[in-house]
Image (cartoon, rainbow, N blue to C red):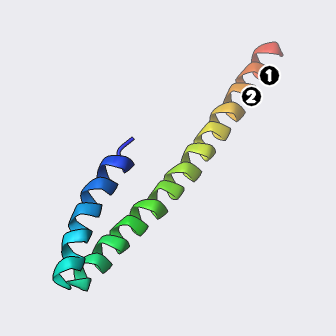
């Protein structure tokens, strides 16, 4: 998974920014992490919809073959 690698990179950048007193960078990093989290939820929902649609198509094809 990419998340542990990204978190380590952002952690280092954020630690250096806090030491220097640059809170803007920390806010931007937080917003980027939040955006990645929201996008992962959207992708999960789309994957679930795709799985349900695939199952529905398989059932319909199976029903039409039995007729």
**Residue visible at 26% across and 70% down in the picture:** 14
Disc 1 packing (10 Å; few <14; some 14–19; many ≥20): few
Q: Secondary structure at mark 1?
A: helix
**Residue visible at 29% across and 54% down in the picture:** 8
**Residue visible at 20% across and 85% down in the picture:** 21
Quarter of the image for the C terminus: give it: top right
| Above/below status of 63 relative to 45 | above
Q: What is the C-alpha distance between the residues marked 2 and 1? A: 5 Å
Q: How many marks?
A: 2
Q: Would residue 46 appear left or right of 26 to someone viewing this image?
A: right
| Above/below status of 21 relative to 56 | below
Position in image of residue 36 (x %, y %) = 40, 61
Residue bearing mark 1: 63
Q: Residue furthest front?
A: 19
Q: Secondary structure at mark 2?
A: helix
| Above/below status of 27 relative to 11 | below
Asked whether the beta carbons under mark 2 and mark 1 sit within 8 Å of each other, the answer is yes
**Residue visible at 35% across and 45% down in the picture:** 2
Position in image of residue 18 (x %, y %) = 24, 78
Q: Quadrant of residue 55?
A: top right
Residue bearing mark 2: 60
Position in image of residue 23 (x %, y %) = 26, 84
Depth check, front residue: 45 or 29: 29
Disc 2 packing (10 Å; few <14; some 14–19; many ≥20): few
């Amino acid at each position: 998974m990419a998340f542990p690698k990204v978190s380590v990179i952002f952690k280092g950048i954020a630690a250096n920014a806090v030491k220097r007193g640059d809170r803007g960078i920390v806010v931007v990093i937080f917003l980027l992490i939040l955006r990645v989290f929201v996008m992962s939820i959207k992708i999960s929902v789309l994957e679930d919809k795709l799985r349900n649609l695939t199952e529905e198509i398989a059932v319909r094809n199976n029903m039409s073959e039995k007729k």
